[in-house]
Amino acid sequence: MKKNYFLLFAALFGMLAVILGAFGAHGLEKIVDAKMLDRFHTGVEYQFYHSFAIGLVGLLVQRNPNAYYVKAAYAFILGIILFSGSLYLYVFTGITKIAMVTPLGGTAFIIAWGLLAWGIWKTETLNH
């Protein structure tokens, strides 16, 4: 069986979300104000959701490796990097221009969910 890198990415992004979430809950509040802490938590939350989405897509790719699933997984990965990553960088640096990248990550998430839906729609049979 071929190595499933999407499942690996899901596990690594999930692990990183736990680490960052713990840091946000136990250390970051001493460093940044409440508004920045809220932004950080938003990044962690979206990273968690989309780590699970990457894992789901990784499992779907194992059963039916269609191009829509693969593209969806890459778009989820890009979304985490751009959306959550830009929020983390913004919180740590305070450079407001970094936050301009965040909507690009959100757009990548929307595209990913659309690709996933289309891939499911185009799949003639789902093995139960």
Image (tube, rainbow, N blue to C red):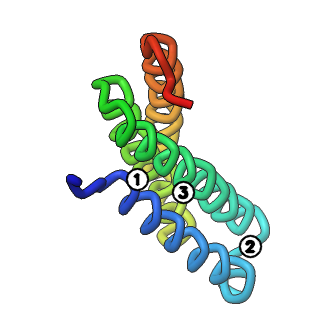
Secondary structure of the residue carrying tag 3 is: helix
Depth order, front residue of 105/74: 74
Distance CA(mark 1)–CA(mark 3):
10 Å
Residue type beneath disc 1? Ile
For image coordinates 53% across by 28% down, the residue present is 113
In front: label 2 or label 1? 1
Disc nearer the start of the sequence (1/3): 1
Disc nearer the start of the sequence (2/1): 2
Residue 3 shown left or right of residue 86 in the figure: left
In front: label 2 or label 3? 3
- Residues marked 1 and 3 touching at CB (< 8 Å): no
Q: Position of residue 55 (x, y in %)?
A: 48, 51
Q: Which residue is mark 2?
A: 33
Disc assigned to residue 81: 1
* Mark 2 surroundings within 10 Å by alpha-carbon count, few (fewer than 14), some (14 through 19), many (20 or more): few
Secondary structure of the residue carrying tag 2 is: loop
Residue type beneath disc 3? Leu
Disc nearer the start of the sequence (2/3): 2
Disc assigned to residue 87: 3
Secondary structure of the residue carrying tag 1 is: helix
Residue 4 shown left or right of residue 46 in the figure: left
Depth order, front residue of 44/58: 58
For image coordinates 71% across by 68% down, the residue present is 37
